[in-house]
Image (cartoon, helix red, strand yellow):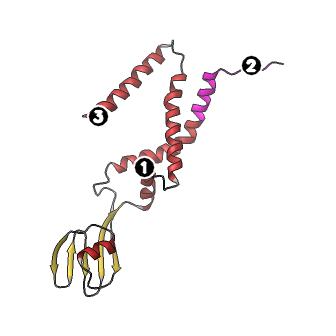
Amino acid sequence: MATKKTPFSFQVRAIHRYLGYFLSGIMAVYAISGITLIFRKTELLKKEVITETILPSNLKIDALATALDRKLSLEKVEGDLFYFENGTYNQQTGLAVLKTMEVPFVLDKMQKLHKASTKSPLYYLNIFFGVALLFFVLSAFWMYAPKMPIFKKGIYFALGGAVLTLVLLFV
């Protein structure tokens, strides 16, 4: 008995459908973290975290910056106390107090998806996700036959999305 061959467009539709279901959770995480990253330079959703660290006493400002692993701009000195942006250092006791604004733990982990480099295992997820999204872009054009009016409307919408993105990038 001969088996009927499934047309390529139906195969692409099936892959598109099930890959879409599979990726929906990843897309939700990317969407939430991407939206929150827009506000990363504000204090939205952040909470104040105060860290106290004991360092060697009598450090000069350059050695203090190295010990704290940050750039420091000395604002003022009062006796043994150095004041710098978001912190203080007591030369006598070696106590450094730093104030930072941080997003909640789970949101911080989610945002790391967008910041992953080749040194992070998330790098593989980012590559997979990017390739899957490119597949979505291409497979969307196999949903309907090119002769159908909905396909032609889809082309116009795709061009409109590309033009809008380019305009916003260069304006």
Residue extending furthest toward the right: 1
Looking at the rendered structure, the kind of residue marked 1 is His
Q: Quadrant of residue 21?
A: top right
Task: Kindly state the secondary structure of the residue where label 3 is placed.
Answer: helix
> Image point 45% across, 16% down: which residue?
152
Task: Kindly state the secondary structure of the residue where label 2 is placed.
Answer: loop
Which image quarter holds the C terminus? top left
> Image point 53% across, 48% down: which residue?
124
Q: Position of residue 77 (x, y in %)?
A: 16, 79
**Residue corresponding to mark 3:** 168
- As drawn, the label of residue 114 is 1
- As drawn, the label of residue 4 is 2
- Segment tinted magenta in the rendering: 1-18
Measured Cα–Cα span from mark 1 to mark 3: 20 Å
Q: Position of residue 4 (x, y in %)?
A: 74, 19
Q: Quadrant of residue 71?
A: bottom left
